[in-house]
Image (spheres, helix red, strand yellow):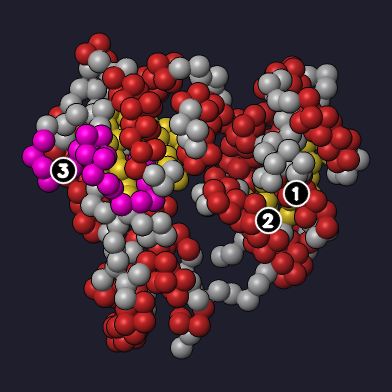
Amino acid sequence: MPKNVKVFISSTCQDLKKDFRRWAIETIDRSDDAEPIAMERWYPDYGHTVEMCLNKLEHESTHFLGIFAYRYGWRPNGPNDTSITEKEFNLAYKLRRKMLLLIPDEMSDIHNELWNRAIDQTDEDKAAQKAFLNRVGGKACRPFKDVADLVSWVTHKIKEWERNEGGIRAIAAAAKPEALAPPRDSLSTLGRIEQTRKFEDGLRDYVSLTAPEVACFLIHGKAGFGHEEMLDRLQKRLSEDREVFPIRVDASAAWRGKDVLALLEVIGKEIEERLDAVETLAGRLKREMTRLDVVIRFDNLQRLNISLADFVEGFWKPLAKSFGEDDADLSQRLIGLAGFKEPLGAGCDQHILRLDGGEELDNTRLIALPELTDFTESDLLVWLKQQKMPPAKAKVLASKLFLETGGNPPALFQELMKDAIWKG
């Protein structure tokens, strides 16, 4: 049964994701008639993060939960912009969403802890967050002194929202006509059998024979050919039968200057630890690898072969070399997934290991999966049937779409997300 209360959760992630966001999501999950709308559940495309978040808030949520502390957060359009968190609040307020806003109790220990988590931000961001908290202070705002207190507030408010008719009225107002096309993330299951098989072969025939198990796989091909979908597929595959510690890094801006420290800063924000060297990161990952696999995913490496070589030489090779014989007894593995939106040039050969070359594993090089190319008509037919389309209709549509697009991924993705082709 669809749930009537859909709660959009807004907060800065760098200081709140690992504890307070997680508990808020779990608390809402345990309720009878409410569900969380949280970015942890939809893996936003980093090129369209703001658009996706605001769209989810406006069209897929009925209520708003804001957890605000002392970090201002990411300004999408530069230092003169408002943070994405403030944009979400502004839209929720404009839409008159019923909301619960939680801020730290200034007399509690958690106030000091969260203050320290935000201490490294600029004076401008500190002033902006102070002004933002003053704005929200009188609007359904409640102080929390620890995780248990936050859970109590969320539980109480969810029960209140579930009891009244607000959830039903709000969802009726917020809902769009039911979409006929499958969700966008279903595209991660389209085709790419060769790449997936080579990945699984690499895990079995190369990575499993090394100690410790450390390797990075490279997904490459023209921009728009499904890098994010392929990365999603492989990341999901890695978590199917093993517990993982995931790290996702948008490498585009961080690696633009070929600056290792900039990349480490992005990773450090994700794992909430200050990193001053690749070796420091290795030490942190080794602690995780005593109990969990670590999957570190690099989206959007720059579209220059020389940049890829710099990434290998400046970051991945030193990281892999930090794992030596003394780490052979680590019980779990470190798997990198790197998305590179460009075909590989000849200058990359010394940094790349190709699985069909018969070479021994050198984990300081990237294991190149087959290049992402056009889809086949057979790929399309199989996927349409997976979406529960009747076989006869799937066969006709697969042939029609392949003829129109030539199997070109960007064109196919665009067509497959149109409701019109799913009618009838």
Q: In terms of sequence position, does the residue under pointer 1 or pointer 2 come before the other?
A: 2
Residues at marks 1 and 2, CA–CA distance in whole angstroms? 8 Å
In the picture of the structure, the residue carrying the numbered disc 2 is 54
Q: Are marks 1 and 2 in contact (CB under 8 Å)?
A: yes
Q: Which mark lies nearer to you, 3 or 2?
A: 3
Q: 217 and 235: which one is in front?
A: 217
Q: In terms of sequence position, does the residue under pointer 1 or pointer 3 come before the other?
A: 1
Q: Position of residue 294 (x, y in %)?
A: 37, 31
Going by the numbered disc 2, the residue's amino acid type is Leu
**Helix, strand or loop under label 3:** helix
Q: Are marks 1 and 3 in contact (CB under 8 Å)?
A: no
Q: Position of residue 146 (x, y in %)?
A: 71, 25
For residue 87, the mark is 1
In the picture of the structure, the residue carrying the numbered disc 3 is 355
Task: Give the magenta-colored segment's residue range.
Answer: 337-359
Q: Position of residue 410 (x, y in %)?
A: 42, 66
| As drawn, 396 above or below 272 | below
Tell me the crowding category of disc 1: few under 14, some 14 to 19, or many 20 or more residues within 10 angstroms, Cα based.
Answer: some
Residue positioned 73% across, 54% down in the render: 63
